[in-house]
Image (cartoon, grey):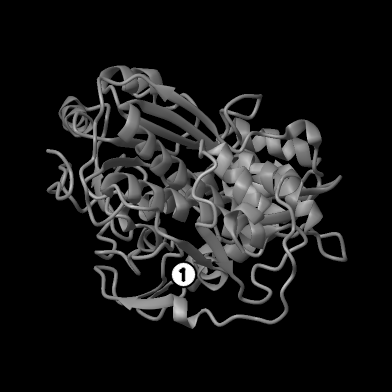
């Protein structure tokens, strides 16, 4: 199937600023009934990887003054990568995806979805509902269920958020809650910042990665695959889950900086002074106090590409709230559509909002780098989990169904790492000549100095 025949691919490519493009450059190879769902998850997944692959091929062609390589996306690779956190094995051990207090709970008038994977979110949720964080998980689970069952869903939602916890009422889809798939704005530059010829699309590109959990790290993991020097920067006070970092830290380095400390801020400013791309995954406005608002960054570093990711979109009453894929599924109406016969809310066959948004964000960055080759301009790119949810609910058409199942084993690999032997999903991004896997395994979270690596394939 040519890319111009796939409506979801066409829509996403246009939303990311792509022109009519190299017709026939993307095709899809089916793999049976992958990512089966009431909603078109398979179609969203392959289109997001398809446009990411096309954006990589376009940038490679522009840097090397050659024709755009053909792109052939394999649905088996996409389905495996979209469930990478479930496929991961660390020394033979399977990570736990959700903590005991993360899940659906029956309220007095409906259902609530909570997220309590991180210790600080767990303690805030329990405090909001007047529960002590003591005892074993089974007792706490029973106590939480009993407490929520006596309260309306929206009351639980608002009480939890007021305390810094995470809970949402399960809702039905609303046309009034539609968000754009992407918001893209060109920014002024100081003349062309041309990337030289290189064997990989993002070779020599320096990326500051200020993201956490899945969507943002998937985007920057993809840029690292394609040759970028990606340095993840985290505050030291909130450790990342080691299993999550083992999954999404492929190809990247990781450092810790407290931007409220003058010495650490000077180190960050030095990194920023040589960066091509800054990717953030925090709530709108939360980094502004450090002088990291988009317009401030673009003023300081003309030609910079600032890519921002959030949960609930960039406007509206929920824009400033914390959120995760599972919560956006619940609040957007996805969980209601996927509900079981007994009325219990359901989930998608993958954390598709996270993974889909990650590949779309990587595609947007690659497209912005391609445009910068011609104009010298930087850009501001904004995507959200809510925007991807809106696309899934209202904009992704079904493709012809395929019967059968698929074997994920060809799309899994074994890699040694500081965490132990990893069995992990291979990247699904595919164009003629694309790398099959990352150049390095994930290092320890926070284990690298705050410095760029060498810059082969790019200007100093």
The correct choice, above or below, for 361 with respect to 421 in the image is above
The reply to whether residue 114 is visible in this rendering is no
Position of 102 compared to 89: left or right?
right
Q: Which residue is nearer to you in this view: 328 or 223? A: 223
> Which part of the image, by quadrant, shows the C terminus?
top left
Q: Position of residue 37 (x, y in %)?
A: 73, 64
Position of 14 compared to 192: left or right?
right
The reply to whether residue 308 is visible in this rendering is yes
Question: Residue at horizontal 67%, vertical 51%?
Answer: 7
The correct choice, above or below, for 228 with respect to 136 in the image is above
For the residue labelled by badge 1, is the local secondary structure a helix, a strand or a loop?
loop
The image quarter in which residue 306 lies: top left
Q: Position of residue 38 (x, y in %)?
A: 78, 61
The image quarter in which residue 166 lies: top right
Q: Which residue is nearer to you in this view: 60 or 65? A: 65
**How many other residues sit within 10 Å of disc 1, few (<14), some (14-19) or many (≥20)?**
some
Question: Residue at horizontal 55%, vertical 60%?
Answer: 99
Q: On the image, numbered disc 1 is attached to which residue?
A: 95
Q: Position of residue 231 (x, y in %)?
A: 26, 46
Q: Position of residue 36 (x, y in %)?
A: 70, 68
The correct choice, above or below, for 454 with respect to 90 in the image is above
Q: Which residue is nearer to you in this view: 87 or 181? A: 181
> Which part of the image, by quadrant, shows the N terminus?
bottom right
Question: Residue at horizontal 55%, vertical 73%?
Answer: 76
Q: How many marks?
A: 1
Q: Which residue is nearer to you in this view: 182 or 261? A: 182
Position of 310 compared to 291: left or right?
right
């Amino acid at each position: 199937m040519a890319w111009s025949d796939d409506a979801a691919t066409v829509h996403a490519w246009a939303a990311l600023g792509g022109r009519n493009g190299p017709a026939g450059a993307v095709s899809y190879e089916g793999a049976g009934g992958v990512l089966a769902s009431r909603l078109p998850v398979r179609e969203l997944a392959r289109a997001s990887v398809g446009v990411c692959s096309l954006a990589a091929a376009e940038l490679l062609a522009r840097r090397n003054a050659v024709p755009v390589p053909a792109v052939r996306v394999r649905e088996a690779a996409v389905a495996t990568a979209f469930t990478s956190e479930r496929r991961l094995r660390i020394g033979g051990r399977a990570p736990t995806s959700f903590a005991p207090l993360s899940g659906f709970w029956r309220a007095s008038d409906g259902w609530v979805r909570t997220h309590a994977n991180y210790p600080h979110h767990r303690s805030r949720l329990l405090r909001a509902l007047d529960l002590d964080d003591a005892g074993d998980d089974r007792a706490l689970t029973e106590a939480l269920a009993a407490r929520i069952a006596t309260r309306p869903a929206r009351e639980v939602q608002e009480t939890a958020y007021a305390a810094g916890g995470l809970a949402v009422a399960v809702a039905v889809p609303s046309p009034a809650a539609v968000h754009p798939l992407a918001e893209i704005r060109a920014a002024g530059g100081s003349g062309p910042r041309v990337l030289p010829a290189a064997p990989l699309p993002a070779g020599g590109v320096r990326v500051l990665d200020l993201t956490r959990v899945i969507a943002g790290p998937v985007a920057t993991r993809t840029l690292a695959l394609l040759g970028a020097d990606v340095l993840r920067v985290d505050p030291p006070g909130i450790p990342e889950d080691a299993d999550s970092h083992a999954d999404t830290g492929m190809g990247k380095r990781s450092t810790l900086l407290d931007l409220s400390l003058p010495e650490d801020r000077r180190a960050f400013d030095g990194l920023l002074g040589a960066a091509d791309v800054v990717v953030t995954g925090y709530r709108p406005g939360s980094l502004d106090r450090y002088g990291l608002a988009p317009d401030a960054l673009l003023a300081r570093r003309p030609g910079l590409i600032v890519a921002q990711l959030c949960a609930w979109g960039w406007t509206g009453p929920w824009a400033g709230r914390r959120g995760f894929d599972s919560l956006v599924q619940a609040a957007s109406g996805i969980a209601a559509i996927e509900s079981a016969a007994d009325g219990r809310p359901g989930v998608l066959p993958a954390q598709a909002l996270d993974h889909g948004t990650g590949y779309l964000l990587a595609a947007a960055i690659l497209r912005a780098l391609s445009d910068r080759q011609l104009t010298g301009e930087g850009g501001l790119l904004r995507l959200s989990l809510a925007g991807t949810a809106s696309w899934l609910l209202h904009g992704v058409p079904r493709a012809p169904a395929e019967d059968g199942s698929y074997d994920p084993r060809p799309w899994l690999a074994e890699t040694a790492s500081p965490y132990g032997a990893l069995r992990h999903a291979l990247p699904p991004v595919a164009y003629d000549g694309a790398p099959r896997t990352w150049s390095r395994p994930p290092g320890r979270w926070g284990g690298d100095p705050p410095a760029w690596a060498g810059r082969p394939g790019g200007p100093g």
